[in-house]
Amino acid sequence: MLMPTRHVNALTIDVEEYFQVSAFAPYIARTEWDQRECRVERNVDRILALLAERGIHATFFTLGWVAERYPALIRRIVAQGHELASHGYGHQRVTDLDPAGFREDVTRAKQLLEDIGGERVIGYRAPSFSIGERNLWALDVLLETGHRYSSSIYPVKHDHYGMPDAPRFAHPVRDGLLEVPPTTLRMFNRNLPSSGGGYFRLFPYALSRWMIEAVNARDGEPAIFYFHPWEIDPEQPRVAAADLKSKFRHYVNLDRNEAKLRRLLDDLRWDRMDRIFLPDLAPAKTRDEVALA
C-alpha cells in the first residue's frame, strides 16, 4: 500500500477545439475550421470556474489560433493567476514541419500570446507530443525563440507519438531549456502512460489516481497531468466520417470525465508548471495562494 504524499503536481490544459485534434485531421480540412461550431471558450470558462472554486492554478498550453479569435479568454486565464504557455499556432505536428516552418509556427504563437496576455511565455507543448528522436532539432528552435521549457517528448510507445527511451522526468535538453515530459509509471519493464488525456477517460478513476500517487511516492517526483477543454464537453458535434478507432479514442467516457476531474482536483495538490519546475522564472504566490497551499 502506498503512503500518502504531499507532492504538488502540475495541472495542464491543452487549449484547442474538438475539430483540431490530430486524429480528425484526415476528415476535417483546415479550411473548414472557421465554419465549424466553436466551443472552446465556454469549455475553458467551465474549467476556470472549477479551478477558482478550489483555489488551484494551472498551465494553459494554448493555440495561437484560439488566442487570435478569443483574446478576452486569454486575458481571463492570465487575470485568474494561471500560466499562459504555447501549444503552437495551428496545431500542426512538429513531424509535419521543417525547421523553418516550425520556427514560424512557434514564433507566431508566442508573439500572439504575449501581446494578448501581457506576460512572457516560456513554456511550449507540441501538438500530439510530436517531438521525438527524429526531430530533436526542434529543441534548438524552442531555445532560440525564447522558450525555457518544453513538455513535448512522451516517453511511451504509441502509434502516433512517443520516445520510449527518453528520460521520464524533468531534465535539461539544452543549456537553458528544460524538457518536462508527461508522466509515466514504470511497470512490467515498460513506461505506462499515467498523465491524463484519453487514458484518464478510459481507466477507472482509482487506477489513474493510484498511478499518479505511485510516481509521487516511489519516484519522489511531481506528476504532470493534462486534459483538453473538449474532454468535458459530451455534447460536442460528432465527426461522423472518422474511423472507429479515432471515434473511440475521442469520445470514450466524455460524459463521465468532468466528474472524474473534479475528484482528481480535490484528492491531490496542483499548481502551475513554471512554479514547480522553474520557480525563479515564475511569479510569486499571493498571500491567498500561500494560505490555500
Image (cartoon, helix red, strand yellow):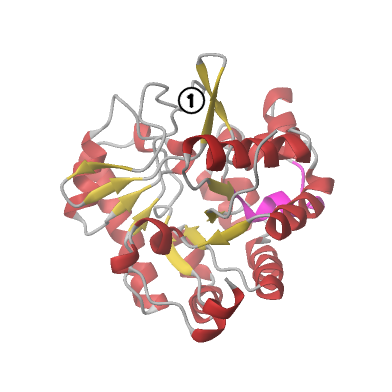
Numbered disc 1: secondary structure? loop
Residue at point 22%, 59% (across, down): 146
Other-residue count near label 1 (Cα within 10 Å), few / some / many at <14 / 14–19 / ≥20? many
Depicted 263 relative to depicted 201: above or below: below
Give the magenta part as a residue range: 227-238
Disc 1 marks which amino acid?
Val
Q: In the current view of this chain or complex, which residue is farthest to the bottom?
A: 287
Foreground pick, 291 / 228: 291
Depicted 75 relative to depicted 9: above or below: below
Depicted 282 relative to depicted 6: above or below: below
- For the N terminus, give its image quadrant: top right
> Where does the image place residue 251, in percent across and percent down from the top left?
75, 38
Q: Quadrant of residue 245?
A: top right
Residue at point 77%, 48% (across, down): 257
> Where does the image place residue 206, in percent across and percent down from the top left?
77, 39
Residue at point 36%, 60% (across, down): 109
